[in-house]
Image: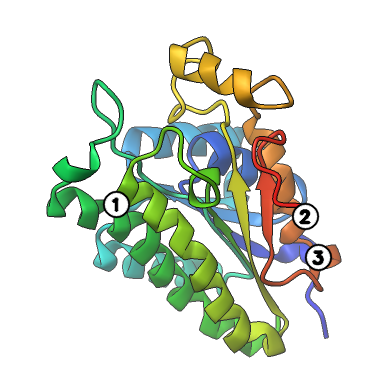
Amino acid sequence: MSRDSKARIAVVTGGTSGIGLATSRLLLERGCRVALFGQKLVNVESAAQALCQDFGSERVFARAVDLGEPAQITSFFRELDDCWGRADILVCNAGISPKGLYGPTPFQEITLQEWNAVLSVNLTGTMLCCQAVLPGMCAQGFGRVVLVGSIAGRALPKIAGTAYVASKAALAGFARSLVSRYAAHSITVNVVAPGRIATEMAGPRDGEVNRTAVARIPAGRLGEPEEVAAAIGFLTSDGAAFINGAIIDVNGGEYAPL
């Protein structure tokens, strides 16, 4: 017996801004209850206030969580389970991409601290979130997992640093492993790989880096968070039940692996 999609519980990591916030809003519009978290409390409070105002506080569960702290992840999912129950949908969107005044740290200057910090959030944090939800998805015979990768993990990186590229490229192998283990339980695991999207992480739209990016993107513009959210939203829907182990590129044609 399938569950009413309007009653589904969705978890969105990094759901307080950019792609994550757009995804949270889309899933709420579809009737889901959305549990989201971000690292900065001020962003969590701001996003929660806006979403509660538009969709009702009973449908929004927002907390501050540092993905680099496993105990905080465990606490979040335990509290969510006590409050709402098991998650049906997991969108792993949170990620960090350290940059200095002159861009990402040159490879030879990357410290072990920086390397471990990026992987602990972008990759290990994703793994821990999946560990938290997959048993429940198996028990109920339904699950949608979407990992947000990056064009930097698909093509020669133009801007991103090595640690970020490595963490995002690793998501494909991670997803394949989960597909092989969980597909028989009606659980899908897919990756969405955005290109240059107009978010806070990307910097000012009219900045030099973004002007250079627009010049090489066939669509002639930056992408919008809502356009990435639309791809994520489809992959979490009932209509995407036979799409499993795919990478969906959302980049305006900058990378076209045809």
Reading the image, the residue beneath label 1 is 118
Pick whichever, 196 or 140, lies toward us. 196
Vertically, is 235 above or below 154?
A: below
Give the residue type at disc 1.
Val
Give the residue type at disc 2.
Phe
Reading the image, the residue beneath label 2 is 234
Q: Of the residues under marks 1 and 2, which one precedes in the sequence?
A: 1
Circles 2 and 3 in contact, beta carbons < 8 Å = yes
Where residue 35 appears, as percent x and y from the top left, is 53, 55
Compute the Cα span from label 3 to label 1: 31 Å
Q: Is residue 49 left or right of residue 123?
A: right
Q: Say what secondary structure mark 2 lies in.
A: helix
Camera-near label (1 vs 2) is 1
Q: Is residue 102 left or right of residue 144?
A: left
The reply to whether residue 25 is in sight is no
Reading the image, the residue beneath label 3 is 240
Give the residue type at disc 3.
Ala
The reply to whether residue 151 is in sight is yes
- Residue depicted at 73% across the width and 82% down the height: 186
